[in-house]
Amino acid sequence: MSSVRDETFEVLRAHGLTTVFGNPGSNELHFLAGLPADFRYILGLHEGVVVGMADGYALATGRPAFVNLHAAAGTGNAMGALANAWASHSPLVISAGQQVRATIGVEPLLANTDAAQLPKPLVRFSAEPASASDVPRVMAQAVHAATSHPRGPVYVSIPYDDWAREATGESAHVALRTVSEAASPSAAQVAALVDRFSRAQNPVLVVGEDIDATGANDLAVALAERLRMPAWIAPSASRCPFPTRHPSFRGVLPASVRGISELLAGHDLVIVAGAPVFRYHQYEPGEYLPAGAELVHLTSDADEAARAPMGDALIGDVRAILDSVLATLSEADGRSMPDPRTIAPLAARATDGTSLDPAEVFDVLNECTPDDVIYVKESTSTTSVFWERIDISRPGSYFFPAAGGLGFGMPAAVGVQLAHPDRRVVAIIGDGSANYGITALWSAATYRTPVVFLVLKNGTYGALKSFAGVMGVPDAPGLDLDGIDFCALAEGYGVAARRARSRDELEAALAEALASDGPTLIEIPTSTTNPFE
Ligand code: TZD
Ligand code: CA
């Protein structure tokens, strides 16, 4: 007779969920003890790191990732990471241990009181099964909820005395069933889009993370070329859905209402594909759209469609919609391709040999990293200069925290590297951001994931200083963090470390790091840049 635990493993196996990202406690030991040989456990030393690694893994594979957290305290530690996973539609199947069923009511140590409520509203589904025998089915329900569009994290709390209980023996049905989707647009919807796109005199394309997530990057390029229009990445970009050296590419839109309408002035049609409309940040009110412009929004997320303040939305598989439109859309007559951007040569600056300009760091990366490098970035003040300079042309090559929650970068880099052992991951991390996920270094060392961690050390929360200027509040305390030795921290966690104060030192350190089969941290003293310039 099989146990609830055996049948739950069958469900996880059926969905390829044999990697467990976790941090254990007494409630989880019954589940983990004697983990089947076809499963592997990836330990993170803090739950934000556990979920960040799983997020990177899910984003890079395009498949669900399985997480095992410790009850309420562990789930609480993971909430910041869940905010990012929610915004990036990451299919994370999160399980959490719970105290023995009969004791939860009297709240013993490490009971998860009102467990299903705890992770809301950052999960698409949350439950504690009503009985032990229902655990395998609820786990399957969670997987299907996580992977159906718009996809996202889900949560299941399991009392630890459930695992050894006798199963119903009916879980085979649960493990074997599939749930698939058919979200192609109708012929009439495609014809309406084609008509609208063809009538536009001066259209512009805005593409978002779901273009990259569905591998529709080539279709976005084809659409831009067909209509000979400029292309922007939607604000607060968490992925790179458009090749940055394509003649149509203009950059990432600013994350403010006024900033966007000013930049898009003169366009009569804004075509947004695979992004919310829009993920704003700084509050700069104004007109949502420039005068005379209409907006068409293509999205797989019904909530995104519903909450947008302007435009006509079509909900469906964005890749399928673009494919159908391109099948009949004619070339734009009488328009030529936009001129490519010019990338300014490095501003001549007196280098005193003690720090590097972030622009120069990105130029070195363009030169020294392999063509299929994957960047994971969490350095907030360097966003504008990064998008100006970096050369990214392949899908799945860039990840940034989708909700802006710091602590994603270092762990996600480890998860992405685990997902793609054949590609190299370079993590570009601010000296502020590094501290939220620093224990990811231990996981990188332990599982020998050869991530190259670049810590850009400007000694401040640089972006916040710039924000303080924009907001007219210049004297906030707590914006400086001098005196952290990241090389010592890296070595403490078992990661090789170098310091690079000049272009030559950086090139040498990068070459050495890329030749190694283990992780390396390179600390780079950098000058401060303003993301609003
Ligand atoms: N805490 C969390 C979890 N997420 C946040 N986004 C913040 C705090 C606030 N915050 C930002 O939005 S940017 C930033 C903070 C603290 C500064 C990050 O500093 P850094 O990067 O050194 O990583 P820069 O390039 O110096 O800005
Ligand atoms: Ca900094």
Image (cartoon, grey):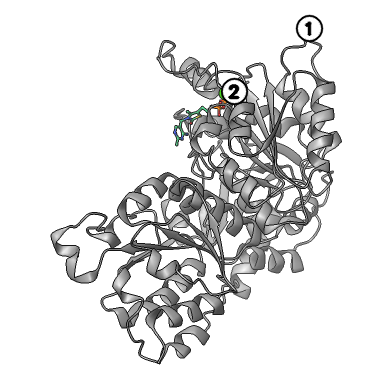
Indicate the quadrant where residue 385 lies. top right
Location of residue 103 in the rendering, given as x and y in whole percent from the top left corner: 18, 66
Say which quadrant the N terminus sits in: bottom left
Kind of residue indicated by mark 2: Asp
Q: Nearer the viewer, residue 394 or 41?
A: 41
Indicate the quadrant where residue 119 lies. bottom left
Tell me if residue 327 comes above or below residue 532 in the rendering.
below
Q: Nearer the viewer, residue 25 or 313?
A: 25
Q: Residue furthest left?
A: 106
Q: Nearer the viewer, mark 2 or mark 1?
A: 2
Residue neighbourhood size for the residue with mark 1, other residues' Cα within 10 Å, grouped as few (<14), some (14–19), many (≥20):
few
Task: Name the residue tied to disc 1.
Answer: 350
Label 2 to label 1: alpha-carbon separation:
25 Å
Location of residue 373 in the rendering, given as x and y in whole percent from the top left corner: 77, 46
Task: Name the residue tied to disc 2.
Answer: 485
Tell me if residue 234 comes above or below residue 185 in the rendering.
above
- With 71 as the anchor, is 308 left or right in this view? right
Location of residue 64 in the rendering, given as x and y in whole percent from the top left corner: 55, 65
Residue neighbourhood size for the residue with mark 2, other residues' Cα within 10 Å, grouped as few (<14), some (14–19), many (≥20):
few
- With 193 as the anchor, is 106 left or right in this view? left
Looking at the rendered structure, the secondary structure element under dot 1 is loop
Looking at the rendered structure, the secondary structure element under dot 2 is loop
